[in-house]
Image: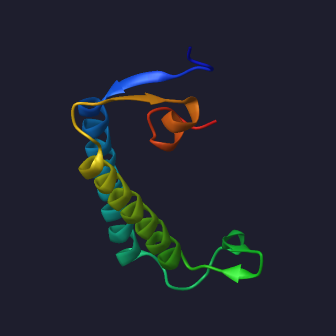
Amino acid sequence: MIEGVVFEFTSDELIKHCQERAEHHEKKSAFHAKRAETAEDEVTDPSMISNKTVQSQKAECLRISMHHQSMAKMYKVYADHIIKGEKYRLTMRDLGELELIKAV
Protein backbone atom coordinates (compact mmCIF):
# COMPACT_ATOMS: atom_id res chain seq x y z
CA MET A 1 0.00 0.00 0.00
CA ILE A 2 1.23 3.50 -0.88
CA GLU A 3 0.38 6.24 1.56
CA GLY A 4 0.07 9.79 0.32
CA VAL A 5 0.66 11.10 -3.16
CA VAL A 6 3.77 9.85 -4.92
CA PHE A 7 4.97 10.18 -8.49
CA GLU A 8 7.08 7.60 -10.29
CA PHE A 9 10.02 8.66 -12.47
CA THR A 10 12.59 6.58 -14.30
CA SER A 11 16.25 7.18 -13.68
CA ASP A 12 16.60 8.38 -17.28
CA GLU A 13 13.91 11.02 -16.71
CA LEU A 14 15.59 12.25 -13.53
CA ILE A 15 19.08 12.28 -15.03
CA LYS A 16 17.86 14.29 -18.03
CA HIS A 17 16.02 16.71 -15.76
CA CYS A 18 19.04 17.21 -13.47
CA GLN A 19 21.32 17.81 -16.45
CA GLU A 20 18.87 20.40 -17.81
CA ARG A 21 18.63 22.13 -14.42
CA ALA A 22 22.43 22.21 -14.14
CA GLU A 23 22.63 23.85 -17.56
CA HIS A 24 19.90 26.33 -16.63
CA HIS A 25 21.69 27.37 -13.44
CA GLU A 26 25.04 27.65 -15.26
CA LYS A 27 23.45 30.06 -17.74
CA LYS A 28 21.87 32.08 -14.94
CA SER A 29 25.20 32.21 -13.11
CA ALA A 30 26.97 33.46 -16.23
CA PHE A 31 24.24 36.04 -16.84
CA HIS A 32 24.55 37.51 -13.34
CA ALA A 33 28.37 37.39 -13.43
CA LYS A 34 28.23 39.39 -16.69
CA ARG A 35 25.82 41.87 -15.10
CA ALA A 36 28.29 42.30 -12.22
CA GLU A 37 30.92 43.51 -14.69
CA THR A 38 28.87 46.63 -15.45
CA ALA A 39 27.02 47.03 -12.15
CA GLU A 40 27.80 49.88 -9.82
CA ASP A 41 30.08 49.23 -6.88
CA GLU A 42 28.45 51.84 -4.70
CA VAL A 43 25.01 51.76 -3.17
CA THR A 44 22.88 54.36 -4.91
CA ASP A 45 19.46 52.92 -4.13
CA PRO A 46 18.30 53.10 -0.48
CA SER A 47 16.07 50.07 -1.07
CA MET A 48 19.27 47.99 -1.38
CA ILE A 49 19.84 48.53 2.35
CA SER A 50 18.18 45.93 4.56
CA ASN A 51 18.90 44.73 8.08
CA LYS A 52 21.82 47.15 8.25
CA THR A 53 23.56 45.22 5.47
CA VAL A 54 24.49 47.38 2.52
CA GLN A 55 24.90 45.58 -0.78
CA SER A 56 26.09 47.22 -3.95
CA GLN A 57 24.50 46.18 -7.22
CA LYS A 58 27.76 44.47 -8.15
CA ALA A 59 27.87 42.49 -4.87
CA GLU A 60 24.25 41.45 -5.31
CA CYS A 61 24.88 40.24 -8.88
CA LEU A 62 27.89 38.26 -7.69
CA ARG A 63 25.90 36.75 -4.80
CA ILE A 64 23.16 35.61 -7.19
CA SER A 65 25.74 34.26 -9.64
CA MET A 66 27.40 32.21 -6.88
CA HIS A 67 24.00 30.86 -5.78
CA HIS A 68 23.24 29.65 -9.31
CA GLN A 69 26.73 28.14 -9.63
CA SER A 70 26.14 26.22 -6.41
CA MET A 71 22.78 24.97 -7.70
CA ALA A 72 24.41 23.86 -10.98
CA LYS A 73 27.00 21.86 -9.05
CA MET A 74 24.30 20.23 -6.94
CA TYR A 75 22.35 19.12 -10.01
CA LYS A 76 25.51 17.74 -11.62
CA VAL A 77 26.11 15.61 -8.52
CA TYR A 78 22.51 14.39 -8.65
CA ALA A 79 22.76 13.54 -12.36
CA ASP A 80 26.04 11.69 -11.87
CA HIS A 81 24.80 9.63 -8.92
CA ILE A 82 21.26 8.61 -9.83
CA ILE A 83 21.22 4.81 -10.09
CA LYS A 84 20.49 3.90 -13.70
CA GLY A 85 17.73 1.43 -14.49
CA GLU A 86 15.78 2.23 -11.34
CA LYS A 87 12.40 3.83 -10.76
CA TYR A 88 12.08 6.58 -8.19
CA ARG A 89 8.98 7.46 -6.23
CA LEU A 90 8.95 11.14 -5.43
CA THR A 91 6.72 13.11 -3.10
CA MET A 92 5.41 16.60 -3.70
CA ARG A 93 8.28 17.88 -1.56
CA ASP A 94 10.80 15.99 -3.73
CA LEU A 95 9.25 17.48 -6.85
CA GLY A 96 9.66 20.98 -5.44
CA GLU A 97 13.23 20.44 -4.24
CA LEU A 98 14.26 19.05 -7.63
CA GLU A 99 12.53 21.96 -9.38
CA LEU A 100 10.20 19.59 -11.23
CA ILE A 101 7.37 21.80 -10.02
CA LYS A 102 7.34 25.25 -8.49
CA ALA A 103 7.68 24.82 -4.74
CA VAL A 104 4.72 26.14 -2.81
Q: Quadrant of the C terminus?
A: top right
In the rendered picture of this protein, how many numbered marks are placed on residues? 0
Q: Nearer the viewer, residue 68 or 79?
A: 79
Q: Nearer the viewer, residue 60 or 91?
A: 91
Q: Quadrant of residue 46?
A: bottom right
**Is 72 displayed left or right of 47 in the figure?**
left
Image x and y of residue 88, in percent = 38, 30
Q: Nearer the viewer, residue 28 or 91?
A: 91
Q: Which residue sits at x=49%, y=72%?
A: 63
In the displayed image of the protein, which residue is found farthest to the right? 51
Q: Nearer the viewer, residue 95 or 20?
A: 95
Image x and y of residue 26, in percent = 30, 58
Image x and y of residue 61, in percent = 46, 70
Seen in the picture, residue 20 relative to 69 is either above or below; the reply is above
Seen in the picture, residue 89 relative to 79 is either above or below; the reply is above
Seen in the picture, residue 50 relative to 90 is either above or below; the reply is below
Q: Quadrant of residue 50?
A: bottom right
